[in-house]
Amino acid sequence: MFRKKINFKGRKIALLAIAAVLMTIGCQKDDICPESTATTPLIKVLFFDAENTDQNDPKSAINLKVKAQIIENDLITRSTVSAINLPLNTNVGENTNVGATTYEFTEYARVSGDTEPNTENPPNTDVLRITYSIAEEYLNRACGYRVLYNNIQVEISEPEDDTSGNWITNITVQDSIIDNETTTYFFIYH
Amino acid sequence: MKQLLTFLFTISIFFLVGLSTVDAQTQTDTLKFKEKYGLRIGTDISKLIRSFVQEDYSGLELMGDYRVYKNYYAAAEIGNEKLAFDTNTLAVTAKGSYIKVGADYNAYENWTGMENMIIVGARYGFSTFSQTLEQYSIYQDSQYFPPNVNTDPIESKGLTASWLELIVGIKVEVLNNLYLGGNVQLKRRITQTTPRNFDNLIIPGFNRTYDDSFFGVGYNYGISYLIPLYKKAKN
């Protein structure tokens, strides 16, 4: 009788061990969002020469500074590049899915703290107002949701009290639906 | 002194093990011990404890089984649960009711007079529930703009799920007709309706789900009482 009882207890312990393992699996924290997941896309922008529109021959913007109007920090601080990735503000107003992000693109940006005027190539700021509608899409439990953009439009203007004229001559929107990061969406001619 | 302790120990062992045994031995002094058949009803204690301890959980499960033939039992559970689940990017709650019906097989060869069980069982489970996305944030690789966090709860009602379940467990008669038991459950989801543009992250009765997997796990720690209806000799 006693042996039988112990035997029974042995099986009980084995079962409890299985239970413990299953519970550990059951309670484990979900994985972090893998980097390969396509989340909220950035807008790929390429710069071209206004006179030479060959798409295989981009032209860099010199000492480009990019900054959103509502953000204090620069997105790009004075670098010479022919391709950039622009994030859009996904915070839209309540009860609407229409959003807007306004960027200042400055060519020949000054080194910060430099007050001496550059007469040859003075800084020139153009304002790009990008409007779009957003659609939220569920990815998985680790990444949560992402945003896709539809009906994207761009307007160029001059900041107030700027008389230097636009350095950007034209922008073309290649695809008004933004749902990946492999397509180049904006071509900027300057 | 040592003898006395041994004596007391032995007595206590008999006392603990054999309340039902003593009963059986006194009333049937024959070779053929008669086993009890009847309806056993109980509740899952772990869900009661979790309801008190965990702030974001409340649940109740009633369970019953009926010994149909020898080692075969018809078994069912009904329950109601409110569960919560959150990750770095979202938080959900779900509440609803479920029913599980199936059968248990007692794989334990009992020593005469004992009626314990090692259970291997199967269930079909069905749950009807609602899920509320309490808050979520938009996942963005770029941190340039302030995070987009939505804190307005979005409730999806009328969701359902069904699954098959494999159960392994034990039931021990601790007092006459009173059983304590535990089991672990491996679940395999068959059908589900999901909210629009979302997924079922938790399902009452099924517990949490896994992305890209149909499986789930569960456990039960129950107390139950046997209402004996008749007795039948063990063959």
Image (spheres, rainbow, N blue to C red):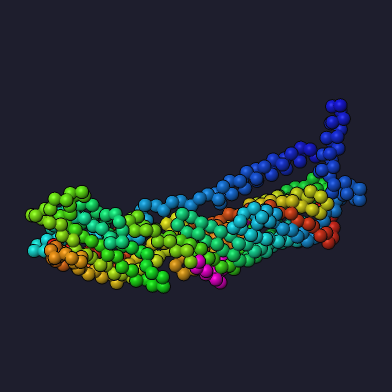
In the rendered image, residue A131, in percent from the top left (x then y), is placed at: 29, 69
Residue at x-position 15% and y-position 60%: A124
Give the main secondary structure of the magenta stretch: strand
Q: Is residue B109 above or below residue A97?
A: above
In the rendered image, residue A134, in percent from the top left (x then y), is placed at: 35, 68
- Judging depth in this view, the residue of B192 and A54 nearest the camera is A54
- Can see residue A80? no
Across the whole image, how many numbered discs are drawn on residues? 0
Which image quadrant: the N terminus of chain B? top right
In the rendered image, residue B218, in percent from the top left (x then y), is placed at: 61, 54
Q: Which residues are magenta?
A: B153-166
Residue at x-position 88% and y-position 49%: B23
Q: Is residue B113 above or below residue B58?
A: above
- Can see residue B118? yes
| Quadrant of the rendered image containing residue B206 | bottom right
Tell whether position B157 is magenta.
yes
The single residue placed furthest to the top in the displayed view is B1
Asked if residue B36 lies left or right of residue B127, the reply is right
Tell whether position A177 is magenta.
no
- Judging depth in this view, the residue of A164 and B31 nearest the camera is A164
Residue at x-position 53% and y-position 65%: B132
Asked if residue B205 lies left or right of residue A108, the reply is right
In the rendered image, residue A136, in percent from the top left (x then y), is placed at: 39, 66
